[in-house]
Image (cartoon, helix red, strand yellow):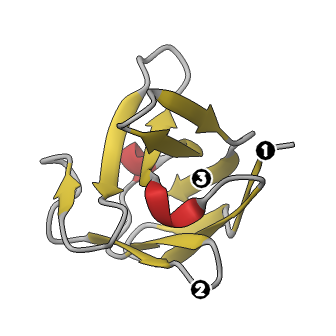
C-alpha cells in the first residue's frame, strides 16, 4: 500500500518559517519525481516546487522562488519543503506528490495545513 504522509504544517506569523516533511512508503522512492502542491480555499491547486528523482534538478513557482527550498533524502524516503519569509498568501493545504515518469504512476498525500497570520 502506497502512503505519503505529510507533517510540519501549522500556524505561523508572517515572516516566519516552517519545514514540511513527507515520508513515502510502498513505492521505489528513488524512482519518483517528488513535488509539493498547495490549494487554498476557492483557488486551484498549484505546483509549489518539485525535485527530480536523484535530486539534481528543482523547479519552483514564481511566487515562492527565493523563499522556499525543496530537498529530498532518498535513504529516508523523505522529501522536505523549507519555507521562509512566509506570507499570508502562502496559507493553504500543502500536498506531497509522487510521480514516476516512466510509468505515469502518481500518488498524493492527505495534505497538511499551513496558515500564515498577518
Q: Residue at x 53, y 43 (%)?
A: 97
Name the image quarter holding residue 72: bottom left
Q: Which mark is nearer the camera, 3 or 2?
A: 2
Residue extending farthest right:
1
Q: Observer-nearest residue: 45 or 72? A: 72
Q: Which residue is mark 2?
A: 75
Q: Which mark is residue 115?
A: 3
Query: Residue 70, position in %: x, y?
Result: 36, 69
Q: Residue at x 43, y 25 (%)?
A: 45
Q: Which mark is nearer the camera, 1 or 3?
A: 1
CA gap, disc 3 and disc 2: 30 Å
CA gap, disc 1 and disc 3: 27 Å
Query: Residue 48, position in %: x, y?
Result: 33, 47
Q: Which residue is mark 1?
A: 2
| Total marks in image | 3
Query: Residue 34, position in %: x, y?
Result: 44, 54
Q: Residue at x 75, y 39 (%)?
A: 110
Amino acid at each position: 500500500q502506497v502512503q505519503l504522509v505529510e507533517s510540519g504544517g501549522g500556524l505561523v506569523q508572517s515572516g516566519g518559517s516552517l519545514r514540511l516533511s513527507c515520508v513515502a512508503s510502498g513505492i521505489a522512492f528513488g524512482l519518483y519525481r517528488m513535488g509539493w502542491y498547495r490549494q487554498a480555499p476557492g483557488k486551484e491547486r498549484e505546483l509549489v516546487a518539485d525535485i527530480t528523482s536523484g535530486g539534481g534538478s528543482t523547479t519552483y513557482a514564481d511566487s515562492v522562488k527565493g523563499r522556499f527550498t525543496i530537498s529530498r533524502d532518498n535513504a529516508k524516503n523523505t522529501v522536505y519543503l523549507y519555507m521562509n519569509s512566509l506570507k499570508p498568501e502562502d496559507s493553504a493545504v500543502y500536498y506531497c506528490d509522487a510521480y514516476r515518469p516512466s510509468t505515469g504512476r502518481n500518488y498524493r498525500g492527505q495534505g497538511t495545513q499551513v496558515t500564515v497570520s498577518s
